[in-house]
Image (cartoon, rainbow, N blue to C red):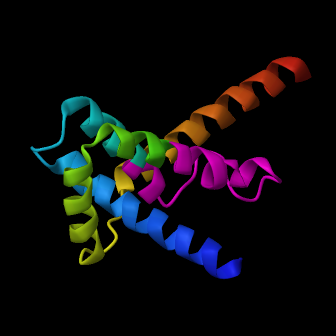
Amino acid sequence: MLERVKSWAKSLKRDVVALWIAARSPRTPVAAKIVAGAVAAYALSPIDLIPDFIPILGYLDDIVIVPLGIALAIRMIPAALMADFRAEAVSTDRPKNLYVAALMVGLWLVGLVFIAAWFWRKAR
């Protein structure tokens, strides 16, 4: 069972890199590029939308949202192209997406400002 989970996790990591490659390839259909790019950017971001320290919800994106996004993007890419991208992903280092990390930090800061403003109004 543990080996199966490890194999699944390894294939997810490979598929995220393959989607990153697919999003940048001119051979990928436009709609698939958009979905693949969004999924890869989020999965490769060092910061999650829901931080992992929040009980249960923190791992929701890692366990449910990211795999579902990967599955959707893979279905949108022709099988022959996806096989090429997977083969290329095996020999490619895992990229990092700092733009999405900055976006997540920005969203958290905006959220904190709104929460602080709400508490400020209630305290008066």
Query: For the point 33% across and 44% down, which residue is it?
Result: 36
- Outermost residue on the bottom side: it is 3
Does residue 19 appear left or right of residue 111 in this picture? left
The answer to whether any part of residue 114 appears in the image is yes
Does residue 46 appear left or right of residue 82 in this picture? right
The answer to whether any part of residue 124 appears in the image is no
The percent position of residue 35, horizontal first and vertical second, equals: 35, 37
Q: Is residue 52 magenta?
A: yes
Q: Please state the total of marks drawn on the protein image.
A: 0
The percent position of residue 62, horizontal first and vertical second, equals: 61, 55
Query: For the point 20% across and 31% down, which residue is it?
Result: 30
Does residue 31 appear left or right of residue 61 in this picture? left
Name which quarter of the figure residue 37 lies in. Answer: top left
The percent position of residue 10, horizontal first and vertical second, equals: 49, 73
Query: For the point 45% across and 48% down, which residue is it?
Result: 70
Which segment is the magenta one? 40-68
In this rendering, is residue 17 above or below 109?
Answer: below
Tell me the quadrant of the picture where the C terminus can be found.
Answer: top right
